[in-house]
Image (cartoon, grey):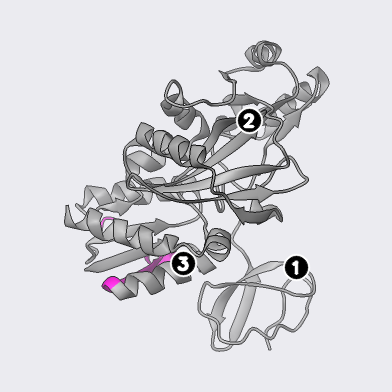
Amino acid sequence: MPLCPICGNELNVGDVELHEIVECPRCGAELEVVNVNPVLLDELPPIEEDWGE
Amino acid sequence: MRIGITYTVIRPEEKMLRERAAERGEVYLLHESELVFPRSYDVDVVIIRNMGYYKSLYLAKLFESMGIPTVNPWRVIVEAGDKLLSTVKLRGCVKIPEWRAAFNEEASERAADEIGYPLVLKPLAGSWGRMLSKIDDDDALNAVLEHRKWMGNPLHRIYYMQRFVRKPGRDIRSYVIKGEYITAIYRYSEHWITNTARGGRAEPCGDERVRELSLRAWECFGEGALAIDIFEEDGELFVNEMNPGMEFKNVVRVTGVDIPGKIVDYAVEVARR
């Protein structure tokens, strides 16, 4: 299972796709799926000026 | 119909848009890591979902320059995505909170005196309430101006401020697409920033005045798919902001209205013009 890069928690992410956002249930970090086979997670890209409206 | 969707990350919104677009044509997901210009893209229309005002702005212009229309169009992103430029568009058409723009610290202090405290100093572009500063007195204003001065970004030295509106623990988010009023929600929060992305609670809003005000605000831009933030104060409604890169998952959840379907229908119509 992929690890949260922030807190090291193992995440049960199920079926995910490249660039999808998942949330770590332990530390609450929002993570980006950067590889799908195997699933690898990274911190989201830096927040930009209007990230989400 | 070949519908392109450019994106930075896949949120629930992008999944919904992809699903609706697949019902109306072929979908081409274009992650920003795959985009290089100039290059030929074999699509009839592009729905721009990248995160970041400037990325969206430049992508729209590049696609439009190649004859590929975008949702939103470049002109709408420019004017609706910038809080000061959209204020200029809205001014005179709909009621907006009292505001000032200033270009150095001294003028900002004068502008603050004119509006009075509390006021809200806002970045020109931004969402989820980031970098909004509620300022209660001269000391707080001077502290924020000093921070802005050293932040390095020249846009942070254009000072846009608004009278603090005393909302009743909620604000309103409405949606108008191609001149059609779609729906609206109340966003409740104990915090003065009521965005649902920051934990606010959402409920459907059936206030007819919101429909009328939203349509008038949309008319100021005359095109596009726009989300509109509205404040209530003592029974009056004020248009606070326009959003050309809207999120909508919470609105779909509480209203059941198919906003992604409406956006895709609009994109198909734009492609056929």
Residue displayed at 36% across by 51% down: B59
Label 1 Cα neighbours within 10 Å, binned few <14 / some 14-19 / many ≥20: few
Q: Which residue is mark 1?
A: A28
The residue tagged 2 is: B235
Tell me what residue is drawn at x 39 percent, y 45 percent: B57
Element under disc 3: helix
Reply above or below: B117 against B245.
above
Both marks 3 and 1 on one chain: no
Chain designation of label 2: B
Question: In the figure, is residue B96 to the left or right of B2?
Answer: right
Is B245 positioned to the left or the right of B143 in the image?
Answer: left
Q: Residue at x 37, y 70 (%)?
A: B20
- Name the residue tied to disc 3: B14
Residue B35 visible? The answer is no
> What kind of residue is marked 3?
Glu
Magenta residues span B24-38
Q: Amino acid at mark 1?
A: Gly
